[in-house]
Image (spheres, grey):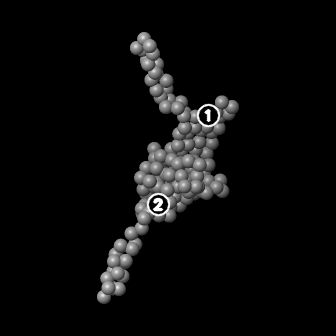
Amino acid sequence: MRLLFVVLIYFSFGHLGFTQEVKKKDIRGVYNYKTGAPARTIGTSDTTTISIPESVFSNEDLKLSFFGVAKRSYNFSNINQNSIGWEKGTWKLSGDTVKVLLKNKEYTYQFEHVYLKAIDAPHGYQRK
């Protein structure tokens, strides 16, 4: 009798995992990663202010589309060079882990509501 009770509890609660089960429609969309300096306002000694606009050094968009199509577009501004381009690849979902394959490199992210947290990638993304 005790064994039956343990088996029933296991099958009732055993399939509840630690990872969230996410659907592809929840993941699809455009994610952004931006580096730079924020906009700010500086006060001077004569009570006037100076407004400095935001400066963006790099801007990347990762678009996860239907049928597992991924596209990364980037725009890097540097003192020595400017680089604009895009890469096309694929993505797949396994639990709450997103694997993106771009130019024969695989990047792994964990989906957290509006973020793609980098697991095996240089940085994460935030949903636009």
User: Residue 127: image x %, image y %?
Assistant: 46, 47
- Determine whether, in the image, residue 3 is placed left or right of residue 97: left
User: Residue 78: image x %, image y %?
Assistant: 64, 33
The residue closer to the viewer here, 37 or 46, is 46
* Three-letter amino acid code at the position of disc 2: Asp
User: Residue 63: image x %, image y %?
Assistant: 52, 49
> Where is 84 relative to 69, above or below?
above
Q: Residues within 10 Å of mark 1 (few under 14, many from 20)?
A: some
Q: Which residue is at 58% across, 37% downward?
A: 58
Q: Which residue is mark 1?
A: 77
Q: Is residue 12 visible?
A: yes
Q: Which residue is mark 2?
A: 96
The residue closer to the viewer here, 66 or 82, is 82
Disc 2 from disc 1: Cα separation? 33 Å
Which residue, as the protein is rendered here, is positioned at the far right? 80
> Where is 55 relative to 30, above or below?
above
Q: Which residue is at 52% across, 32% downward?
A: 37
Q: Quadrant of the C terminus?
A: top left
- Determine whether, in the image, residue 76 is placed left or right of residue 1: right
